[in-house]
Amino acid sequence: MIFITCEDYIYHTIFFEEELNLSFLSVAKKRITWLLNLIHCAMQVDHILFVDDDEATLFYHQMMAEESGVTNHIITARNGDQGMLRIKELITHHHNENTLVFMDINMPAINGWDVIESLEKMNKEVFKNIHIYMTSAADHPRDIERINQHLIIKGFVSKPITAEKIITLTQ
């Protein structure tokens, strides 16, 4: 992995723009500068947990979490049962650490709503550092309404989850 400072990046970009006179570098420079600013402003989280039944989606979201740079500890769960188990482990062993949870709504057997309803039986205080976001590729109005009825859910994030979305949630 290569780390560069904003100053190094801007200097090299300006040098290459003058040397090669390529306008697309200007667009790339603006995008990378924007991402660096977002990362700089983002808080670090101790854990990110993705709960989804689709392996390709889990792989992509894990890559996006790595790209975001907000944590070094990314956890995945392939169904609602595993997701519930991982959340309970985080509550038990890492209750003072900030955790982002991305919970897929539509999963076979135990879906995201089932997990939430089971977790809500626990003391609400244990969720002070666990930020749960429901996810789906489709943003149905009934799901958005339902999210507002659950105190332990912080919000909704549409799929795919990008590095920018993760960074924005940590600001």
Image (tube, rainbow, N blue to C red):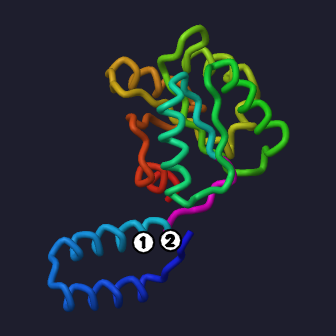
The residue type indicated by label 2 comes to: His
* Residue identified by numbered label 1: 37
Label pair 2/1, CB-CB below 8 angstroms: yes
Q: Residue at x 36, y 17 (%)?
A: 142
Query: In terms of secondary structure, where does tag 1 sit?
Result: helix
Dot 1 surroundings within 10 Å: few (below 14), some, or many (20 or more)?
A: few
Q: What is the spatial separation of the Cα atoms under label 2 and label 1, in whole angstroms?
A: 5 Å
Residue that label 2 marks: 40
Is 4 positioned to the left or the right of 79 in the image?
left
Q: Does dot 2 land on a helix, a strand or a loop?
A: helix
Q: Is residue 69 left or right of residue 37?
A: right
| Depicted 59 relative to depicted 166: above or below | above
- Classify 9 as above or below 136: below
Q: Is residue 27 above or below residue 155?
A: below
Q: Position of residue 18 (x, y in %)?
A: 19, 91
The span shown in magenta is: 41-47
| Image x and y of residue 22, in percent | 16, 78
> Residue 115 lies in what quarter of the image?
top right
Would you say residue 51 sits in the magenta stretch? no
